[in-house]
Image (cartoon, coloured by chain):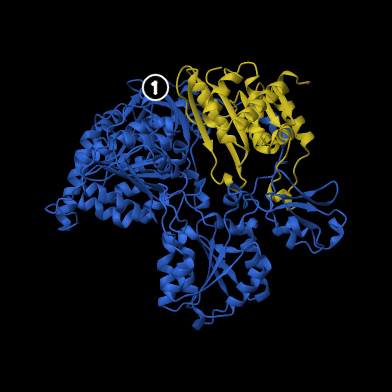
Chain colours: A blue, B yellow
Amino acid sequence: MMEMIREEWEGKEILLQGNEAIARGALEAGAIFYAGYPGNPSSEIIETLAEASRELPIYVEWSTNEKVALEAAAAASFAGCRAMASMKQNGVNVVSDFLTNLALSGTKGGLVLVTCDDPGGISSTNEEDARLFAHLAGIPLLEPATPQEALHMTRWAFELSEKIQNIVLLRSVSRLSHTRSNLRMDKLPDFKAAPYFDPKVPFHAFPVVEKDLARREKLKIAGALFENSPFNFYNGPVSPELLIICSGCAWNYADEAVEILGLQNRTGILKLGTTWPLPNELVKKHLKTCDRVLFVEEIEPFLENNVKAFAADLGKAIGLKEFMGKASGHVPLCGELSPDILLGVLGKLFDKQWQNTAFIEKTAAIVGDRLPPREFGFCPGCPHRGSYYAIKTALAWDNRNGFVSGDIGCYSLGLFPTGFNQVKSVHAMGSGLGISCGYGKLEKFGFDQPVITVIGDSTLFHAGLPGLINARFNNADILLLILDNSATAMTGFQPHPGTGTTLMGDKTDPVDPEALCRALGVSVEVADPYDMKEAARTIYRLMQQAGPRVLIMRRKCALIQGREGGLPYIMHINRDLCLGESCGCGRYCTRIFRCPGLIWDKTAGKAQIDEVICVGCGICADICPQGAILREEKA
Amino acid sequence: MDPMNLIIAGVGGQGNVLASQIIGRAAVKKGFMITIGETFGLSQRGGAVMSHIRISKEKKYGPLIPPNRAHFIIGLEPLETLRIIEAFGNEKTIVIANSRPIHPLNVIAGDAEYPDPHWIKDALGSACGRLFWLNATDLALDLGGPIMLNMILLGAFCALPGVPLEIPDVEEILKTIFSEPDKLSANFEALKIGRDLILDYKF
């Protein structure tokens, strides 16, 4: 979408994704330094800026983790330049130690932290609400509701940051980040920058109490600016029967539900874009107009709790209110909101029928429960399938109730049937390794179960190294499998320290995990996940040893192999050799192996290759006891 | 019909998001206000993918279509098409459905049953206003690969009455996406195949 930076598109309507709009907003603000760590739903922000960096004088990087990203961006701010860091909600946890201290030291050039939260955990391990960090760090919070607003708000966030000399948090959600809408762009500035760090003005948190007071003063200034912000507006009658206070993407659903139910003259919507600190006077003015208040926001009752606390302070000045929202049970506590949910909430409150009951009942009667869910799985040709199959085989040979400790990446799917249910714990980036450091010291208490730790190559660099060094330092019994697929595959193939290219396309010496382990004094071997039997033997042998051990399971992500010319085989089933249901294998190839490219022909009662899906990695040929799955070299 | 609500449903890797972007860009060029909500999540890993597209002359609507208010549904995979009917379809919804299943892993493993595609066709036909059941994957394979599927269905969509886009509008956008002449002409061809499937459709 590089029309986005073309001059001829300025002032014209263009279709942009929420994340692209955030990127454009930062460019219109003249920010020159961008850093982040990939993670759905945030990744396209940095990717868009990286594309823009080919034609604009800006710097963009994928950092090794989110904390480093914000620290790097802070340096640009300290030197007087505008900078931005972006990440998903989990990344803000990683950043938090630096963030809470940065909020005390303050900043210079406009500095914006973008978090893309994931209500419902559509592509996450949790649905954490990163807005709470604005509260915790004592910094301003902005929440756009549409892509156009995301652009304007991001642009203004830099101004706000410079006005109060502190970092600003901007919060998107999956739905907004991945909404495309036509919007209007303004001009791009000339990106002139003259970074200079003034040694007379250091950045630190001391004396702590004074800095804390100063931070709170900055927040007050932001609050005063918020009172007249165009990002806050009210639609509805002067004295509504119900006041809906909402923020972010959820505003769209409330707005449309009111329209569908025809409640425009009975409800008022106070849409807040500047949500911390609250624009107190504005909120007070509207609280006075109505005794029933409904909060509509995603994940935590953030606005709800803050407005309620504020209302308690106001006391008699606004009178007694009936508050409805997450606490009262009117709005679901968990999961993403939708027009459906808002129609349900408002339909009930105003006793309005809105469902097409006849159609729903008719279709429900036809469809019933005959639609199987679509289970997540590794892609056809994915090396992780081979890795987990080898792990499963080795653990079965060993027969001591061994299990796998994992963390975050495509390989988290090892929790599920696609990874043969081998993974038994998943938490944060790098946590599988830290947890295994603990298992690795339980032997003296009689712990005898072998534990295999898995970590992806990008995750190793992100948060795995401290755990690995800890294992070496404390001589913990760990067997670490680095699932090295040369990619940050989960989030769309961003380069990382091991890939040999930076985000802006510069060549760099790749960090070699093997050399890294050697330097740490940890024994290391390499295996090929496509050679499952040999890999299983190696894993089994290493399981019988003590101390920290690393096995690198090395094979490129199937999607990358696909881009680089494809995989080597065309697969066939020899239908004479496949004995089908009568084989005695119990349909092993499909029941257990679960590759989307290898399906079961119910009519023939035999295995079948789905040629639309199969990519030709060939590893399934090694699991058929009859040798009925055949590899043919591609011409 | 304002906003005009369209859903594209399918499975990761079928070109859903690209198809919705092309429709969106073509509609912006014709002066419409567009909002597209993309749901993909773990789609790269074989999950369901759905795009909500809202086209209006009046205003920019939210990224999610309210229940049972889709005017059109383009289904790239039969099971995923039927799955969303109850929530988003209605008596008048026009459905273009590709007939070729992609088996979910639980079906491959024998833990669940994939409904008979003929039954899916009948179910879609009796639930909605009008169904175009197209054998589009095979035609895509003849054209050079399963990835051409989305273009065939896009061509079919443009041929429907009430759709404010025509094939030349889509072609204009494709020109900005594909620079290689052979790729571009294959995509143009796919659009025409799709259009003819609708024009020659026998109910």
Residue found 40% across the figure and 52% down from its top: A91
To which quarter of the image does residue B11 belong?
Answer: top right
Estimate how packed mark 1 is, as few (under 14), some (14 to 19) or many (20 or more) residues with alpha carbons within 10 Å: few
Picture coordinates of residue B199, whole percent (x, y):
72, 18
Which of the pair A317/A214 is nearer the observer? A214
Query: Which chain does the residue under circle 1 lie in?
Result: A
Residue at label 1? A12
At label 1, the amino acid type is Lys
Picture coordinates of residue A235, whole percent (x, y):
36, 23
Image height check: is A142 above or below B22?
below
Which of the pair A7/A156 is nearer the observer? A7
Image height check: is B9 above or below A105?
above
Asked if one can make out residue A314 in the rendered structure from this viewpoint, the answer is no
Q: Secondary structure at mark 1?
A: loop
Residue found 66% across the figure and 45% down from its top: A373
Left or right, residue A151 beside residue B44:
left
To which quarter of the image does residue A151 belong?
Answer: top left
Picture coordinates of residue A525, whole percent (x, y):
55, 72
Image height check: is A449 above or below A559?
below
